[in-house]
Amino acid sequence: MGKFHTRLFFFMFLFCFLLFIFPSCSVSPKNFPIIPFDEGYTPLFGDHNLIIHTNSKTVHLSLDESSGSGFASHDLYLHGYFSASIKLPYDYTAGVVVAFYLSNGDMYEKNHDEIDFEFLGNIRGKDWRVQTNVYGNGSTNIGREERYGLWFDPAEDFHQYSILWTDSKIIFYVDDVPIREIKRTESMKGDFPSKPMTLYATIWDASNWATNGGKYKVNYKYAPYVAEFTDFVLHGCSVNPIDHVTTNCDNTAQISDNVSFGVTPLEKIKMENFRLKHMTYSYCYDRIRYKVPLPECVINPQQDERLRKFDPVTFGNGRRHRRGKRHHRGQDNQAENAASF
């Protein structure tokens, strides 16, 4: 009976990790402190469309005909762990984009860095899509986009979205499931983000590209579109914007106590299963954009075959993410987003 129970426990444990789609099977290794909004962030744009609730624990960002809205971190950061629980707008959300991202475009207009979570709205009955992307040193002509579905409805409840950024890798997490790991390679050179960045969150009208290449646009009869944010984590090496002197860098060292620098073997199982089940686009498999995959790409033949079944995704020339002052992702920037899906 002892051996039987040992084997049963092993298979139940392995099954739990393989079926990553059940969040109850996930054990979070991350115990970073949650901070109030006003301790780490400041409103960026939108005025009345940004509402702070419940002792600064929750923030609502709204989009209506007058404006989108957004907020930004007080500090710049060089590496760290950044996270928030987000509940997306529901019902008809075509053309709406909610973004949670790091950028330094206000400081480095021609050679900026960026690490993106973007949530792309959809027509009624169709799911939200998630897009991740990375730019380094202004390498916007080399897109490294990926898109995914999710194993839950992100408009029904809050879910945690997190970015781990170190000098050697970037990991995107959804509810503690790693969905993408980018390892810095020598071939990437300056394309890997390496300069201090500000953390942003925005909601905005991207009717001309976000849903089926602009076929479906924002319909303001469903406005306001409200994205809710809570459980804010800003844990990194802060940088003085004037002299670029770093402070609180012990925070970055402490990350190793909470998050392993890399994806563990069990996390890798979850990540690979997620990607095989939910990824709908990756630049590594886009033969139209890149006749030869970029050097960091590792091609999975099974994934290659699966992604051929999805409609092609193209990105127009000059696709950039400029937001103007303090990276305002607003309506005046829509013309620069020429993606079609």
Image (cartoon, rainbow, N blue to C red):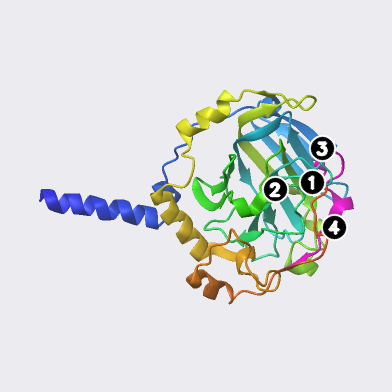
Give, as a three-letter code, the residue at label 1: Asn
Q: Residues within 10 Å of mark 2 (few under 14, many from 20)?
A: some
Q: In this figure, which residue is indicated by the disc labeled 2?
A: 190
| Residue 55 image point, x, y percent | 66, 25
Of circles 4 and 1, which is in front? 1
Residue 107, numbered label: 3
**Could you give the CA–CA distance between mark 3 and mark 1, rounded to whole angstroms?**
9 Å
Name the residue located 75 percent from the left edge and 44 percent from the top edge. Answer: 202
Q: Give the secondary structure at mark 1.
A: loop
Q: Which residue is mark 1?
A: 111
Mark 2 and mark 3 in contact? Answer it, CB < 8 Å: no
Of the residues shown, which amino acid type is indicated by label 3? Met
Disc assigned to residue 336: 4
Residue 282 visible within the image: no
Callout 3 crowding tier (Cα within 10 Å): few <14, some 14–19, many ≥20: some
Which mark is first along the chain, 3 or 2? 3
Judging depth in this view, the residue of 200 and 265 nearest the camera is 265
The answer to whether residue 307 shows anywhere in this view is yes
- Confirm or deny contact between disc 3 and disc 1 (CB under 8 A): no
